[in-house]
Image (cartoon, rainbow, N blue to C red):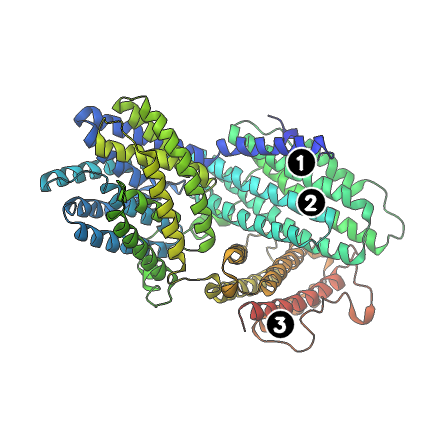
Amino acid sequence: MTRSLGKAAAPPGKGRGAAQVRRFALRLFWSLLGSSVTNGLAVGVGLMGIALGIFFLDGVAAASAAGLGVLVTTLPDLPARKHHKLQQMLPAPALGAPLFLAIQLSHHDPWQQGAVLVLGSFVSFMGVAWGKRGGPISVGMAFAMLLSMATPPAGFHDALERTGWFVTGAGLYLFYGSAVGAWLNTRYRKQLLAEAMLAFAYALRTQARRFATGPRAPQLMADMLQRQAGLADALQAARDVVLESPTRPDRQKRAAMLLALLEARDHLIACELDLDQLARRQGDATALPRICEALNACAAEVEGLATDLLLGRVSRGAREMRQLLHRLTGHAEPPSRPTRDARLVQDVSDRVAAIGGEIDRMSALEEGMQAPEIAAVRENWQVFTSPTLWSWLPLSSQRGWYAPTLRHALRVSAAVGCGYLLSLHLPWASHGYWILLTIIVVMRTNLAQTLERRNARVAGTLIGCAAVATILASQPAPPALLASVALATAVAHAFAIRRYLLTSIAATVSGLLQAHLLVHGLHTGFAMAERLADTVLGAAIAWLFCYVLPVWERTALPALVRRTVDAQVRHAELALALGHRLSTPQAPDLEWRLARREAYDSLSALVASTARTLVEPAAVRPPLEPLETLQARSYQLLAQLTAVKSTLQLRRGQLDMERVAPALAAASASIRQAMEAPSASRTPDTPPSEGAAGARPPDALADDLTPWLLHRLDDIVEGARLLGTAARRAAGG
């Protein structure tokens, strides 16, 4: 595997098709080496070891109940901070065990069991109020309850015994998961950092395509925003693990590489401003292919560095990228009187070279040629990671009738109740728990994800049922069945977020074999048609109940818009305030870094919500134009502020700070006012000015950058006004 494999450039025809195949193979390769697969394999080994150990101790029934306890505990077992692994996994089995026992005790009374199912579903899915942390716990509690239905009716003593094995399996896995999580922590740091780098490389390639086609291509702009949203998620996942306790040299190196990646992301955002200016001025068209080539070279270098991290090999430098960047920034002697377009191209080239500089820094850090500088993160790493403490505050915020989590919990419990009643009156030998399992895994908090899961679930069940029928036809021994459950669980766990179709296939195999062991022991009978019918019914019920007590995206948009605007204002104030820190211009600014993270996170949440509206009914779909305008304006404001911030940090000697300092303060105040109050001075569609009364804008490459910076501040204030107007339109104001 060489660095050249990361290149995306290819000639038309067969060459382009070969490049696409190569890119697909590379992405598959990266996925197999990623943190999700490592985590899934660890889960499968733990489940197989515990289930087989209990099987040899007390037989298949005990192993099946214990395996269910392990399965529930594995759902929240994801790559996370080393010292909070137990806290992350414990709630699912602790809250799932009472539900498991309640179903065991209600086997003889269908009405009592139905009441437990409805109430248990409501309680379980109120856990979604805790966001990404709460989702796996909610599903785990529901799984504990629904798979408990697969066991045959038994007396009070048998119910307690099964619950005891459930708790035993969960307890053993809690110990195993915590130990393995600590052991794999170093590997997870490399993998999550590499995955963030790959997400950045995808964004680089998208930006390269935008330079090739121009900024007015709406689909590429939408793709760029989606890439940035995915990058924000990958960066947060990396922060949570990579920045935890950066006390050892290897951890400090990874943390410094992540900080360099964040800086490179800022320079990439700033390219948006350069691209817009090039398009307006019809810049030097001959330079655009070189810019695209350099961006793709940067992407290839990042992909190569990420591959080295995943393979655990030593980085081999960035020679090819440096050569392309040298050709870009110094391919010819500058003319004695360069044109404005030539200077603009040179400025863009310098921006791309800055991205290459950060990539060079990552490579040097990986090779040990540069010492990490992470003083602020070393002392305050907790503020950069996601919260891990549990509190009642998220739940208390869901008390209103229109609270999204409350409505989702009511919707799921109603769907489960309907599915259970239907299972009692079907003409075939229905397996009620399979209908309900399908409802639980298909039904999401929004229609877009529900439709995606519905289709994947039906297709995955069809393939999974065929696989189970094949496995049972060979009459495998109980240890082989338990090993198959463990392997299927590992695959389902590994691809739950990335490829749900694979997860659906593997989950079908795991769930059916698990339930088969709970019900039949060594019996190999299996009705594939009945399982498929149950799945189709469950998927249909989940889809229909999405329209019961719906929470459409438009109801959440005002809050998301407000969050985006607040984050942009805060980030602008702190980015411009950097100009006042004259004594230590290179010192890390903790408040600004946190504000920058919130600006990106809020914008990515808005992008994701806007994408989900596309599949909602037209009658409830909000107007897309103001939302797209708001996203583009926010993205451009981030680019403008990045350009100013980098100038304040790196080229302060070319600024007259006596003029710049008050201008920064005035611009900061004007930005807040522009975003919070409408302005009637210009129409919302008027583009930012390029100079008063048609004058030529100041030169960004002049010896004195003060005129350029003051002109840029005027553009930023105007852009903030347009952003505020777009925000009020998007929020319905």
Mark whose residue sits in front, 1 or 3: 1
Q: Nearer the viewer, residue 632 or 240?
A: 632
Marks 1 and 2 sit apart, C-alpha to C-alpha, by 10 Å
Marks 1 and 3 sit apart, C-alpha to C-alpha, by 43 Å
Q: Is residue 112 depicted above or below 621 in this figure?
A: above
**Residue carrying label 1:** 8
- Is any part of residue 590 visible from this angle? no
Give amino acid for label 2: Ala
Lower sequence index among marks 1 and 3: 1
Give amino acid for label 3: Ser
Q: Secondary structure at mark 3?
A: helix
The reply to whether discs 1 and 2 touch (Cβ–Cβ < 8 Å) is yes
Q: Is residue 254 left or right of residue 491?
A: right
Q: Which mark is residue 670?
A: 3
Q: Residue furthest right?
A: 336
**Residue carrying label 2:** 208
Give amino acid for label 1: Ala
- Residue name at image x 61 percent, y 49 percent: 223
Measuring from the top left, give residue 677's x and y in whole percent: 58, 75
Q: Nearer the viewer, residue 36 or 139?
A: 139
The reply to whether discs 3 and 2 touch (Cβ–Cβ < 8 Å) is no
Q: Is residue 187 left or right of residue 431?
A: right
Measuring from the top left, give residue 218's x and y in whole percent: 66, 55
Image quadrant where residue 583 sits? bottom right
